[in-house]
Image: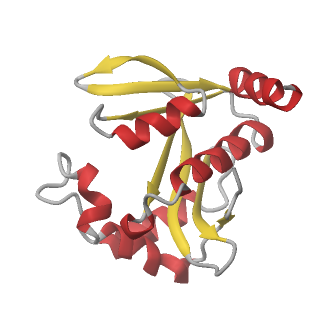
Amino acid sequence: MPNDLQFYIPRLADGWFYVKMMRDPATMAYNAPWFPPDGCIPAPEDEWRRLWASWIGKTPERFYAFLQRKGDGAFVGDVNYHYNPKRDWYDMGIVIYAPERGKGYGKQGLHLLLDRAFQVDGISLLHNDFEPTREAAYHIHKAAGFREKGMVDGILQLELTREDYLEDRSAHCEG
């Protein structure tokens, strides 16, 4: 799989892209149960300032980056992970801007995030959860090696350990 993406650690002034995604009903539709009616985040400018201040430069406790297309520098989404002390794991997220979906960026972005988490920051376990109806998200997570850990209140729980990820990568490199 060619990788057309790279991480871009945003500056405060780059928040326009975050705001654009958070205001886009097609991008945020998955979020509608928490932010009715369309999932869009209220006051995304304020949310961006809070996110930027508390997430940028806070690795390995917190990591946040835009996904940037290498060819033209366009932003296509964002990724993150953060430590959850109550669960002793890292929760992660990935959002692809709706007009950029269907181009393989979710899969590429997830692999970039996994490499960063497991090989750079040495994280031991990544966790993600989402509704089982989000089939594209489910398939890219399963293809990357995530395992189902059950359902909680109708939300699918998925995990991937550093050991499993590195073992799987090693097996693919040898074969």
Q: How many marks can you see?
A: 0
**Quadrant containing the C terminus in the rendered view:** top right
Q: Is residue 106 left or right of residue 113?
A: left
The residue positioned 64% from the left and 79% from the top of the image is: 73
In this rendering, the answer to whether 50 lies above or below 124 is below
The picture places residue 31, in percent across and down from the top left corner, at 26, 51
Which residue: 27% across, 64% down? 26
Q: In which quarter of the image is residue 29?
A: bottom left
- In the foreground, 54 or 111: 111
- Please say whether residue 41 is visible from this viewpoint: no
Q: Which colour scheme is used?
A: secondary structure
Q: Is residue 69 left or right of residue 142?
A: right
Q: Position of residue 74 (x, y in %)?
A: 57, 78
Q: Which residue is drawn at 22% across and 57% down?
A: 39
Q: Which residue, as the protein is rendered here, is positioned at the far right?
A: 174
In the rendered view, would you say 50 is above or below 130?
below
- Asked if residue 100 shows in the view, the reply is yes
Please identify the residue farthest to the top as the structure is shown: 150
Q: Which percent across, then down, holds residue 60?
A: 69, 45
Q: Identify whether 124 is placed above or below 18.
A: above
Q: Residue furthest left?
A: 37
Residue name at image x 45 percent, y 67 percent:
100
92 and 131: which is toward the camera: 131
Q: Is residue 132 above or below residue 12?
A: above
Q: Where is residue 173 in the image (x, y as percent from the top left)?
A: 85, 32
